[in-house]
Image: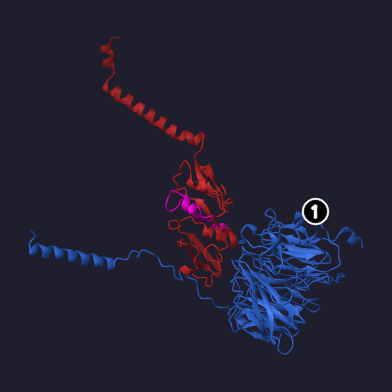
Amino acid sequence: MSAEEKNIKLTRRDFVRKGIQFSILGGIGVMAGGLLPKLVGQEYVWQIDTKKCTHCGRCATSCIKTPSAVKCFHAFDMCGYCDLCGGYFRQGVKNLNTGAENQLCPTAAITRQFIEEPFFEYHIQKDLCIGCAKCVKGCEAFGNGSLQLQVDQSICDNCNECSIARDCPSNAISRVPSGKSYLMQGINWKNET
Amino acid sequence: MITDKTKKYIFLSVAFISIVLFIFWLAYNPVKHFNASIPGLDHRPEHKPDTVTTVNIGEKFIFIKDHTSSLKGKWPNFRGADFDNINKEEIALIDQFGKDGPDIVWRLGLGEGHASAAIYNGKVYILDYNEAKKTDVLKCLILETGEELWRRSYKVNIKRNHGISRTIPAVNDLYVVTIGPKGHVMCVSSDKGDFLWGIDLEKAYGTEIPYWNTGQCPLIDNNVAVIAPGGKSLMIGVDCRTGKVIWETPNKGKWKMSHSSVMPMTYAGKKMYVYAAIGGICGVEAEGKNAGEILWESKAVDANVIAPSPLVLDDGNIFVTAGYGFGAVILKLIPDGDHFSAEIRQKYGPTEGICSEQQTPLFYKGSIFAILPKDAGSNRNQFVCCEPKDGKIFRWTSGKATRFGLGPYLFADNKFYILDDEGNLTIAEADRSKFKALSRTKILDGQDAWGPLALADGFLIMRDSKEMLCINIRTQNDIKK
């Protein structure tokens, strides 16, 4: 078969058809390539082991992000819903009300709401939380430990070397599989990355 | 050349821009998006004592059977017969649990709480809360078997708040006095449970029930029930036979009820009742025509939660401690005519010396023993010993590997019996030079095993949040005797 005959056989229609076939195959290949690591392996993210955390406060200043990617999370199942909340009020406070002078949080990131006598519900405003751990320390000392520090995966840049992990005095921060990206006590998290 | 007219325009323009900028600067509020943290944002309603709900104290009674016991041991109220948490019976007690573990005599399921037992002549008295029936229930049991003899109850709706029940009855030959979680005082006969009288402290005295329900345990002294309601009377003495209030201490400082209990003390020939309220601490004349009169008071105890009771030391010294950041204060009473003044000998924070969050410390042979609170820094939750002359110097601590949470402890047969939060019971040698654990065993499931221990006739009673348990800790030799 001569070269001329070959050129005659590769029509424009054939060219387009082959092009589409190659595109589809290529797309499938790219998708398979993307899914392969998730199927055969896992990504890892930084997270705090709450059992090791000593609430030293370095998470607030060591993170490269401002404010820190470490935030206070609230395990509602563990909370006692106390009026006198060690995570909300400063020690020795006389008036249990929402006045700024009574609050432990330096940025007023915790709100409290009366539910029914004698219970109050506490919520963390993530955009205000700086991860200083003052509330976590208070809750651990006087309550059930329902306030806990965690790396907020929706904010964390997942740096190759985490500057908080480098500074953490109790080695509480380590890489964990992205499928189990939160290590809080008292909560069954849905897997989220 | 710039003409005068141009200069004038430039000047006017600059002046105009400056004025505009000044007005903008004045009008601009850089913090207008801030939300002020002011009282009331939690929408808390104003507190009003419950004057509507009527509680018919002692309304129901179930008699099960009679019982006469040969046992004569007594742990008749909170902290035992002498209010010192020391069992002084001449009974040899175990110092090892052995291979088979503790000798469990009986178990009893209870409503969630920390209420503990009083023991009197072979009978056990507990004020429980039945969550299903919503009743305070005073139960009388046989010490050796845990079988119930009778129960007296009354309906009162109480919500769970870190447990519900948390007081210990006071018992003598004739009477049992209880204080329920919502301040309902009940007096019944100790033998048959016959109802004698009741007082609703919230209604009668305007008592403000403390956070997490009432923790104050009553005291019976010469058949007078001594109770500290706060509200309109700081302390009252009630004739157990008639229910008549025979003396009252006015509450001029508007002090409030704490979780602390009234402790008797005698110093410089005066018998007094010492009470650490929310607002301050005081001593109240205990006998004579001036009974109920305040002998001394001090605002050195300014904690907003006080669970431990005042610990009476030697020579007119009183050790007062509280958790939640308070620490401790040692007061010295100085006689001043018929009254006293209270001098602060030492005051320090929770990381600086011996203090306690929940259990009342123990004073034995001139030393104070306590479990440190959770906010005591690196020594937190350790069992420690110190001398009263300086609460900041520890003779010893139990060590970082031996912590006890907020659990109770007592002293008997020259040993400490210490229960931790998780239901592990430790026997430790009573030694002023070092801490030495002799034996340890898991004995309760242990959610919040905080109820004070009670010991009489070799039967040690303890509880966690949902179960009470009695073990026999007599030595085998002693049992054979």
Q: Quadrant of residue B93?
A: bottom right
Residue nearer the viewer, B443 or B268: B268
Q: Which quarter shows the C terminus of chain B?
A: bottom right
Q: Chain of mark 1?
A: B
* Number of marks present in the image shown: 1
> Is residue B272 among what the camera can see?
yes
Q: Is residue A164 positioned above or below B218 on the image?
A: above
In what element is the residue under mark 1? loop
Whether residue B55 is in magenta: the answer is no
Tell me the blue chain.
B
Q: Amino acid at mark 1?
A: Gly
Of the 4 image quadrants, the one containing the N terminus of chain B is: bottom left
Q: Position of residue B40 (x, y in %)?
A: 46, 71
- Residue A172 pos. (x, y %): 56, 48
Whether A21 is drawn above or below A153: the answer is above
| Rendering coords of residue B245 (x, y %) | 69, 86
Towards the viewer: B379 or B230: B379
* Residue B303 in which image quadrant: bottom right
Residue located farthest toward the top when viewing the structure as drawn = A1
Residue A66, magenta (yes or no):
yes
Identify the magenta region. Answer: A56-78
Residue B42 appears in the picture as rendered: no
In the image, B394: left or right of A21? Answer: right
Name which residue lies at 72% across and 83% down: B286
The residue carrying pointer 1 sits among few (fewer than 14), some (14 to 19) or many (20 or more) residues within 10 Å by Cα, namely few
Q: x, y (%) of residue B229?
A: 64, 79
State the image quarter where residue B206 is shown. Answer: bottom right
Chain A shade? red
**In-front residue for pair B11/A87:** B11
Residue receiving disc 1: B101
Residue at 50%, 53% (x, y): give it: A58
